[in-house]
Amino acid sequence: ATASGPSSTSGSYVSLAWQHDLSSAVSTNTSYQYGIRSGTDSLGAIGTSTEYINSLSVGADWRLSQTLTTSAEYALDITSSRTPGYSQTTHYVIVTVNKRF
C-alpha cells in the first residue's frame, strides 16, 4: 500500500527587473529572481524539501518596421536542493517574430 495525501508548497521570492530603450526601435531588458521554496509531497515529512531558485533573463526587442517586430531572450534557471534529485539547471532561448496585418 502507498500512503497518499495532500501536497503543499510555500515560498518567498525577490525580483529585480530593468529595461532600457537604446533607440525608438531597439530596447533591452534584464531580470533576476531569487527564491526559496519549501514543500511536502503526498508522503508528508518523508518528501519534505527546500529548493533555492535563481533565475536570470536577458533579452532585446527590435522594431523592424511599423508592422514587423522581433525579439530574442535567453533565460537561465538554477534550482538547487540538498535533497538528491531535486537540483537542476535549465537554459532557454526564445526568438519571436510578430507581423501585424
Image (spheres, rainbow, N blue to C red):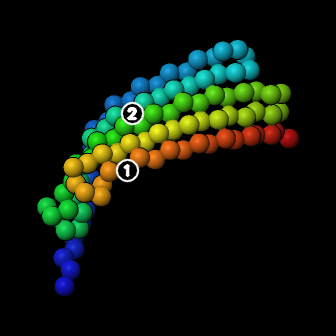
Q: Which label is found at residue 33?
A: 2
Report which residue position mark 1 lands on. Answer: 88
Q: Residue furthest left?
A: 45
Callout 2 amino acid: Gln
- Would you call the spot at circle 2 few (<14 residues within 10 Å), some (14-19), or many (20 or more)? some
| Residue 18 falls left or right of residue 7 | right
Residue 57 in the image: above or below residue 44:
above
Q: Which label is found at residue 5?
A: none
Q: Secondary structure at mark 1?
A: strand
Q: Residue at x 24, y 63 (%)?
A: 41
Residue 7 in the image: above or below residue 12:
below
Residue 15 at x, y percent in the picture: 39, 30
Q: Earlier in the sequence, mark 2 or mark 1?
A: 2
- Gap between marks 2 and 1, in whole Å? 16 Å
Callout 1 amino acid: Gln
In what quadrant of the picture does the C terminus appear? top right
Q: Residue at x 38, y 42 (%)?
A: 78
Residue 66 at x, y percent in the picture: 83, 28
Q: Residue furthest bottom?
A: 1
Q: Residue at x 56, y 37 (%)?
A: 74
Q: Residue furthest right?
A: 101
Q: Secondary structure at mark 2?
A: strand
Q: Please state which of the two labelled residues, at mark 2 or mark 1, is closer to the viewer.
A: 1
Q: Based on the displayed image, in which of its 4 quarters is residue 2 positioned?
A: bottom left
Q: Residue at x 33, y 31 (%)?
A: 14
